[in-house]
Image: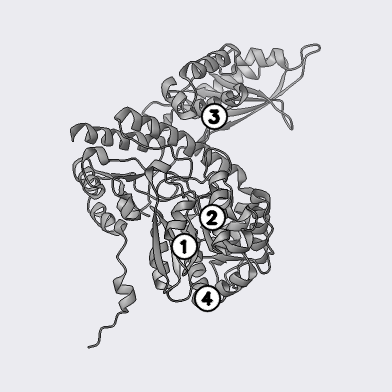
């Protein structure tokens, strides 16, 4: 298999299942184990694969957690654009994601906090007090139906007849 | 009271799968590798078109042959995949699944006593449909040593003056065998020489894992003597929609549509609208599912090897057909014991013809997790016996 093709296929699989064993990956793709391991390693080194995370539906646990999407409007700084302010935001560990957006606002910040108060505190004390930030709009996530391509609200059930021609 | 039944119908053996199905039904804890349909849901955009058609009130009969738009899409599909051009007005019709088209093709083409060559192991309906059409089914027993491909000499061996039709069941259920272009050429030569007609069941045509499927109709001199049967069930995971089609020479199609008109009227309208969407925008879905089947196929064969279960490499459909001869058990015995002792359902090879003896059909239309769980049971069983 061509290297590009192998990389694409590996990424498609590990994106859905990062726990899959190398030997199994190699069997599934019909390539030698050493090739699969090598391709994964080089993609890790190149920063294409940035981490192996676990998807958790916190709402099913007893642990309190709230997530919020915050739209942020920013005055870009001369010579640095949005990068400096984005960096100041993403350095907070409670910030899960920061995206530069096209359209009506500039940065999309996804925040995970223990409580509503914590998120509110972050927005009013940390975010909106930064110099270059013009305004923020905070949206709390009420329910996650689907995340990272996985439907969270119901489990797969095989409803087929168990034997058929 | 008089016997209410037809002798012809009562003489037909019930499907070997049925019997097995009944045992499985009583076991709640049994898991299965016995399913002959995709595990994927129909892609949402296709379902959505079906729903949309209902919302718009498209709840009436369509023309007997099917929606014109759908027939045009089917012809375009045949053109882009096989380079075959069919006239949407006269050379295609939309059926209730591929199975209906098989039945109609046989009924439209045979006279009482005509012989129909049926390679086995193969799908369960060819033989009974041939009998119902008053034909004489003549079985060609495909051989494991040929990887269950059809050889020209096997046709010649069974050919008589009454032989009219050859059923071509490839990519094959239950073996997963495909016919390579050179296999097809060799077979086509004999077909032309013996002036046979072909009913080519290509329902699994989109699911091949080494090179693209080639229709026998695309070979020189074959289009005019071939009815190609296709459908949406396997490629687009649409089994429940009951949507298939046949393409072929107008002369034959006209008579098939006549029977369809009286027996069926038309294929379900909702399904037909969904089918248009499938053919127009479903290529990516098919590619995704094919890729996923291919991964499972490789995993399955690897596991067989580890278990010491001999199996030729299948390059089509979503089945593997390992040999269980070394266990000393018959297929039925093996399948029954596997079910009773390990709660795992597979289909004995004999359900697809007597020559399936010594084999079992394993379907890999299961999620990777289910497949692994089931293979663990198979491994345990093989170790024990």
Q: Nearer the viewer, mark 2 or mark 1?
A: 1
Q: Is residue B43 left or right of residue A165?
A: right
Q: CA distance from mark 2 to mark 4?
A: 22 Å
Q: Quadrant of residue A135?
A: top right
What is the x, y in percent for residue A64? 42, 26
Q: Which mark is residue B87?
A: none
User: Which residue occupies the foreground of this view, B92 or B234?
Assistant: B92
Q: CA distance from mark 1 to mark 4?
A: 14 Å
Disc on the earlier residue, 1 or 4: 1
- The residue where tag 1 is placed is B99
The residue positioned 28% from the left and 55% from the top of the image is: B21
- The residue where tag 3 is placed is A12
- The residue where tag 4 is placed is B259
- Badge 1 density bin: few <14, some 14–19, many ≥20, Cα 10 Å: many
Disc on the earlier residue, 2 or 4: 2
User: Element under label 2?
Assistant: loop
Quarter the N terminus of chain A occupies = top right
Quarter the C terminus of chain A occupies = bottom left
Q: Is residue B369 left or right of residue B383?
A: right
What is the x, y in percent for residue A80? 77, 12
Q: Is residue B228 left or right of residue A17?
A: right
On the same chain, marks 2 and 1? The answer is yes
- The residue where tag 2 is placed is B232
């Amino acid at each position: 298999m061509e290297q590009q093709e192998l990389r694409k296929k590996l990424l498609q699989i590990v994106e859905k299942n990062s726990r899959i064993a190398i030997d199994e990956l190699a069997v599934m793709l019909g390539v030698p184990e050493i090739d699969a391991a090598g391709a994964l390693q080089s993609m890790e080194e190149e920063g294409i694969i940035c981490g192996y995370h676990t998807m958790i539906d916190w709402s099913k646990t007893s642990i309190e957690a709230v997530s919020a999407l915050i739209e942020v409007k920013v005055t870009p700084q001369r010579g640095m654009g949005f990068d400096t302010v984005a960096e100041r935001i993403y350095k907070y560990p409670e910030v899960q994601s920061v995206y530069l957006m096209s359209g009506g606002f500039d940065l999309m910040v996804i925040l995970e906090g223990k409580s509503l108060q914590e998120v509110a505190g972050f927005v009013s004390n940390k975010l909106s007090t930064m110099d270059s930030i013009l305004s923020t709009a905070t949206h709390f996530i009420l329910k996650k139906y689907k995340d990272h391509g996985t439907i969270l609200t119901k489990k797969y059930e095989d409803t087929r007849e168990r034997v058929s021609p | 009271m008089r016997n209410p039944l037809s002798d012809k119908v009562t003489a037909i053996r019930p499907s070997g799968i049925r019997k097995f199905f009944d045992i499985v039904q009583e076991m709640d804890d049994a898991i299965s590798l016995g399913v002959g349909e995709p595990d994927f849901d129909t892609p949402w955009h296709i379902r959505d078109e079906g729903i949309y058609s209902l919302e718009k009130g498209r709840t009436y009969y369509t023309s007997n042959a099917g929606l014109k738009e759908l027939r045009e899409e089917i012809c375009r599909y045949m053109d882009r995949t096989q380079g075959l051009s069919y006239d949407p007005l006269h050379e295609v019709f939309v059926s209730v699944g591929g199975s209906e088209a098989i039945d109609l093709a046989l009924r439209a083409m045979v006279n009482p006593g005509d012989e129909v060559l049926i390679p086995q192991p193969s799908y369960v309906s060819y033989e009974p449909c041939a009998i119902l059409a008053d034909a004489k089914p003549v079985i060609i027993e495909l051989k494991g040593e040929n990887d269950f491909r059809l050889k020209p000499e096997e046709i010649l061996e069974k050919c008589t003056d009454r032989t009219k039709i050859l059923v071509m069941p490839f990519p094959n259920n239950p073996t997963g065998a495909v016919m390579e272009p050179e296999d097809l050429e060799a077979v086509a030569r004999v077909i032309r020489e013996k002036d046979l007609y072909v009913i080519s069941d290509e329902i699994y045509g989109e699911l091949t894992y080494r090179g693209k499927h080639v229709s026998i109709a695309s070979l020189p001199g074959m289009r005019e003597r071939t009815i190609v049967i296709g459908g949406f069930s396997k490629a687009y995971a649409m089994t429940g929609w009951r949507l298939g089609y046949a393409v072929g020479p107008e002369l034959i199609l006209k008579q098939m549509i006549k029977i369809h008109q009286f027996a069926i009227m038309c294929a379900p309208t909702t399904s037909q609208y969904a089918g248009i969407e499938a053919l127009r925008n479903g290529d990516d879905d098919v590619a995704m599912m094919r890729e996923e089947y291919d991964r499972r196929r490789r995993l399955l064969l690897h596991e067989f090897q580890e278990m010491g279960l001999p199996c030729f490499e299948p390059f089509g459909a979503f089945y593997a057909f390992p040999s269980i001869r070394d266990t000393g058990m018959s297929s039925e015995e093996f399948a029954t014991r596997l079910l009773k002792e390990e709660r795992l359902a597979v289909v004995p090879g004999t359900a697809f013809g007597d020559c399936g003896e010594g084999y079992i059909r394993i379907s890999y239309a299961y999620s990777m997790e289910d497949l692994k769980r089931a293979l663990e049971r198979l491994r345990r069983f093989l170790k024990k016996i």
